[in-house]
Structures are given as structure tokens and as C-alpha cells.
Image (cartoon, rainbow, N blue to C red):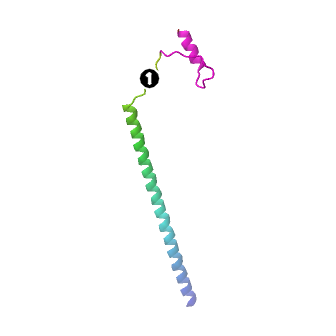
Amino acid sequence: MSTLNVFRWTALGAGVVYGLFHSYSLSVSSEKKAAAAEWAHKEALIAKAKAEYAKLHPKPAASATTTATLDFSDPNFDFAKYLETALKE
């Protein structure tokens, strides 16, 4: 009879430990899902705000009458664009 009681208590203890572990993993999973949903909501709000700001504050169009300067040290220097501008003049 003693062996049967040891088996019963061992099974009960294992079941309790499994239940606690399973409950913990479910709660962590739901917290992660809630955090991801909150993050996605914030991203959506930011994208909406950026779109609204872009609508209210449009960027000025680049002027086609700007003259291209010959500056080889400028990292944004575009030689093809300079040639096109020079040929148009």
C-alpha cells in the first residue's frame, strides 16, 4: 500500500507542477500578444500622423531653374545632371 501512496503523491505533485508551468506559459504568451498588438496600434497611429503631416505640410517642389554648379568635392555631385543642365543652356 505504501508504494501506491508514493505513486499517487508523485503523480499529484507532477500534475501541480505541470499546471503551474502551463499556466505561466499561457500568461506569458498572452502578454506577448497584447504587447505586439499595442505596438502595431502605435505603428498605425504613427503612420497615420505622418500621412496627415505630409498632407498638411507638402514639400516644396525642386525648382527646374536651379543652375548646377561644378563642385567635384560634393558627395551629391551628379555629373550627368550637370551635363544635361549645361547642354540646355
Magenta-colored stretch includes residue 31: no
Residue 35 falls in which quadrant of the image? bottom left
Q: Quadrant of the N terminus?
A: bottom right
37 over 46 or under it: above or below: below
Q: Nearer the viewer, residue 3 or 86?
A: 86
Kindly identify the residue that appears in the image at 42 percent across and 47 percent down. 42
Q: Which residue is most to the right?
A: 73
Q: Nearer the viewer, residue 56 or 21?
A: 56
15 over 71 or under it: above or below: below
Magenta-colored stretch includes residue 75: yes
Kindly identify the residue that appears in the image at 44 percent across and 23 percent down. 61
What amino acid type should be assigned to the residue bearing mark 1? Ala
Q: List x then y, in percent, for residue 33.
A: 45, 55
Q: Which residues are magenta?
A: 65-88
| Position of residue 86 in the picture relative to residue 30 (left or right) | right
Q: List x then y, in percent, for residue 57.
A: 39, 31
- Find disc 1 in the rendering and name its residue: 61
